[in-house]
Amino acid sequence: MMAAPVMIYFDGLCPLCSREIALLQRRADPQRVEFIDIAAADFDAAQHGLDPLAVHRQMHVRVDGQLYVGLDALIAMWDQVPGFRWLAAFHRFPLIYPLAKLGYRLFAWIRPKLPRRRSAVCSTRACDRSNR
């Protein structure tokens, strides 16, 4: 089976991230978009051609082979899901983009400090790869 043309890498232990991804999954075409939990025990960043530290620091999205990181990853992700394309367009406005980029950087800095969800596989702080 070929990989989906859109691969969204998300942190399944982040409650905010998981909520947004759940909304997107309900609308996304499963033949086109694949959601990959970077907190899963079997996730290997190197297998996906990703830096293992960077993928835990900022959002990553691959669209047709092109890798997007940070705010650009969010915009690329929203572009792929019906009902969210307006959000991508909004964040591209010249006055909005730099403010949103700054806001995303702040969120990316704070996110590892937020409470984490516990998974059946990962019940210790040792699984919290975002602090490496």
Image: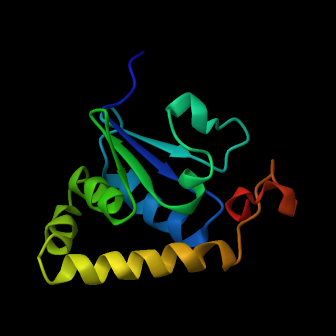
In this rendering, position of residue 93 left or right of residue 34:
left
Q: Residue at x 25, y 79 (%)?
A: 98
Q: Residue at x 66, y 50 (%)?
A: 39
Of all residues, the one furthest to the top in this rendering is 1
In this rendering, position of residue 75 left or right of residue 15:
left
Q: Residue at x 67, y 45 (%)?
A: 40
Q: Is residue 15 above or below residue 40?
A: below
Please identify the quarter of the rendering in which residue 42 is found. top right
Quadrant where the C terminus sits is bottom right
Quadrant where the N terminus sits is top left
Q: Residue at x 67, y 61 (%)?
A: 130
What's the coloring here? rainbow
| Labels in figure, total | 0
Q: Does residue 10 appear anywhere in the picture? A: yes
Which residue occupies the foreground of this view, 76 or 80? 76
Q: Does residue 123 appear anywhere in the picture? A: no
Q: Residue 64: where, in percent of width, then height? A: 26, 33
Q: Is residue 25 above or below residue 1?
A: below
Please identify the quarter of the rendering in which residue 69 is found. bottom left
Q: Residue 83: where, in percent of width, then height? A: 21, 62
In this rendering, position of residue 54 left or right of residue 63:
right
Please identify the quarter of the rendering in which residue 70 is found. bottom left
Q: Residue 63: where, in percent of width, then height? A: 29, 40
Which residue occupies the foreground of this view, 72 or 32? 72
